[in-house]
Image (tube, helix red, strand yellow):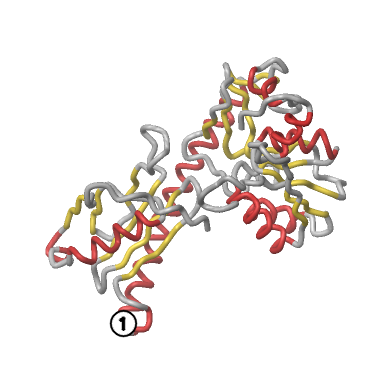
Amino acid sequence: MKLRKRPPTEGGHKANIHLYSNLYSNTHSDDLAGFYDHARAYGLPIPEVIADGKIHRFKVEGDKRGSKNGWYVYFSYPVAAGAVGSWKTGESYTWCSKSGKSLSQAEREALKRQYHQARIQRNREQEQNQQQAQAKAKGILSRAVAADPEHRYLVNKQIQPYNLKQYKDSVLAELRDIDGTLHSLQFIKPDGSKFFLKNGRIKGCFHAFGDLEGASVVHIAEGISTAATVHGWQKTPVLAAMNAGNLLPVGLAVRQAYPDIRIVFAGDNDRFNPAGNVGKDKATEAARICNGLVLLPEFPKGSTGTDWNDYFCQQAGGVSNE
């Protein structure tokens, strides 16, 4: 899972803590602070911690206003423990106030049962949200038209619309699973800003340029412009996984459905990222696990490009904004 860079702590900010019933009234503030610091270390600071053993949602820093992609659960019995994660990225991180070796068998069993119940609740809520998003995606797609080749985003990226759709002023990318089932949509504005349908499934889904059936090679890239660029260049089916963390889930889905196909991960070269070359690292990991290959763009000195769309735009003398 993607390890987020720890954000700076400002002014000794602490989570607001609500304690429910006498069962939770003896919760130690040090334990709660430890859980909050754990969440914050992964870039998922929780605005308030409700210690009732139930799943709670919150807005993740950097997400659009009104969204609640973050979730957490906190137990104070039999020991202080919890988990935090993001429905958007699929990441999750557990925490416990005691080391695994110091837990008694009874404590282990109790925590196991509580985590199991919390997982059932989380999965049930996620499934309901995703089903609603799926229905909304189908409705929007039914009203969409073929993307205008003169759409500013496509022109700026120097890519053909291929099978992309357009809804109002947004280019639409369809997020489907390996069976072709529509789950969500990505909207791309003329200025290149992007957002996904709220609560739509992303993990394991992709937008496909070209047909996998009968293909001997498939390329998997991150974004739409990169995938469209590689599709035009390699003349192979190319899947846009939408983010580096989704390269592996998409690759595994392809490998299971098409065991003999050659998979090439056309990764981003995030060489300027202070958190590390995430694009290269995720593509390399996915290739290792899926028995695939990695194809990374190399740029001349002075170039600010990071992906294959940047590479070809610069080769042609164009400007890439992604």
Question: Secondary structure under badge 1?
Answer: helix
Judge by depth and name the residue closer to the eye, 112 or 217.
217
Residue 276 screen position, x and y as percent: 56, 53
Judge by depth and name the residue closer to the eye, 32 or 10.
10
Q: To which residue does mark 1 refer?
A: 106
Judge by depth and name the residue closer to the eye, 254 or 41.
41
Q: Is residue 60 above or below residue 31?
A: above
Residue 29 screen position, x and y as percent: 18, 63
Q: Is residue 56 above or below residue 114?
A: above
Amino acid at circle 1? Ala
Occupied quadrant, residue 189: top right
Judge by depth and name the residue closer to the eye, 164 or 176.
164
- Find the residue positioned furthest to the front: 301
Occupied quadrant, residue 212: top right
Residue 309 screen position, x and y as percent: 71, 34
Q: Is residue 7 left or right of residue 212?
A: left
